[in-house]
Image (tube, rainbow, N blue to C red):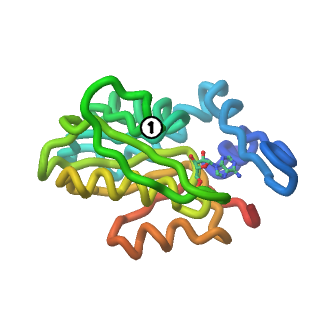
Amino acid sequence: MKTTLEDTLLSSIRTIKDYPKPGILFRDITTLLGDARAFRRAIDELVYPYAGLKVDKIAGIEARGFILGGAIAHQLSAGFVPIRKKGKLPHETVRVAYSLEYGLDEMEMHKDAVQPGEKVILVDDLIATGGTAEGAVKLLTQMGADIVAACFVIDLPDLGGRRKLENLGVTVRTLIAFEGH
Ligand code: AMP
């Protein structure tokens, strides 16, 4: 019997209860990344709508967005742009504050990483409240990027992140969803 993409992804993602704090179900994609077939299927599925289109850059959010984004960039023959926690990038940066579950943090991108009008796809492993991705969208928009889509393997729809990005006019693509948080 042929396994569906959803089965492959669901069975390759490990859930860790109460990590990093009580009440959180942590969706660990290291097991997906370590499974050659699941990793390839996830990347192929994220990439296929954009095959043959002009995409200039993939922007990946630290740190799991780097792994997925690197593979997607390679497949689409696009460049890769890291969006990092503050203080990690060596050259001139643009910075934005973004909301976490408790409080605020800041993320940065190199000022010269994206040119105005370039077509960019934003990538991370999971969208929850959408605060992190919203911060990344603000950085990219500030640099004049044309955001083609924001792509995630996992959606936690109960936390409303997808809607937050769609309200900013961003197209969102996710492969699987888990209820709750
Ligand atoms: P948010 O800003 O609330 O959308 O959170 C998204 C970011 O936090 C992503 O970079 C995820 O990797 C991480 N994250 C949030 N919730 C979880 C979770 N339940 N399991 C794994 N990663 C999570």
- Counting from the top left corner in percent of width and height, residue 170 is at 35, 66
Q: Say if residue 2 shows up in the picture.
A: no
On the image, numbered disc 1 is attached to which residue? 86
Front-lying residue, 19 or 11: 19
Please provide percent x and percent y for residue 68: 48, 35
Residue sitting at 31 percent across and 52 percent down? 139
Q: Secondary structure at mark 1?
A: loop
Whether 31 is drawn above or below 149: the answer is above
Q: Decide if residue 162 is on the left or right side of residue 167.
A: right
| Whether the residue under disc 1 has CB within 8 Å of ligand 1 | no
- Relative placement, left or right, of 5 versus 23 is left
Q: Is residue 159 left or right of residue 65?
A: right
Q: Residue at x 20, y 50 (%)?
A: 143
Number of disc labels: 1
The image shows residue 89, relative to residue 170, as above or below, that is above
Q: Residue at x 27, y 48 (%)?
A: 120
Residue 150 image position (x, y, % from top left): 40, 55
For badge 1, the amino acid type reads Lys
Q: Quadrant of the C terminus?
A: bottom right
Q: Residue at x 25, y 32 (%)?
A: 92
Q: Quadrant of the N terminus?
A: top right
| Residue 161 in sight in this render | yes
Task: Work out whether residue 88 or residue 30 is closer to the camera in this orientation and state it.
Answer: 88
Across and down, in percent, residue 9 comes to 66, 44
| Other residues around mark 1 within 10 Å, as few (<14) / some (14–19) / many (≥20) | some
Q: Quadrant of residue 102?
A: bottom right
- Judged from this view, the residue extending furthest toward the left is 116
Q: Residue 127 is drawn in which quadrant?
A: bottom right
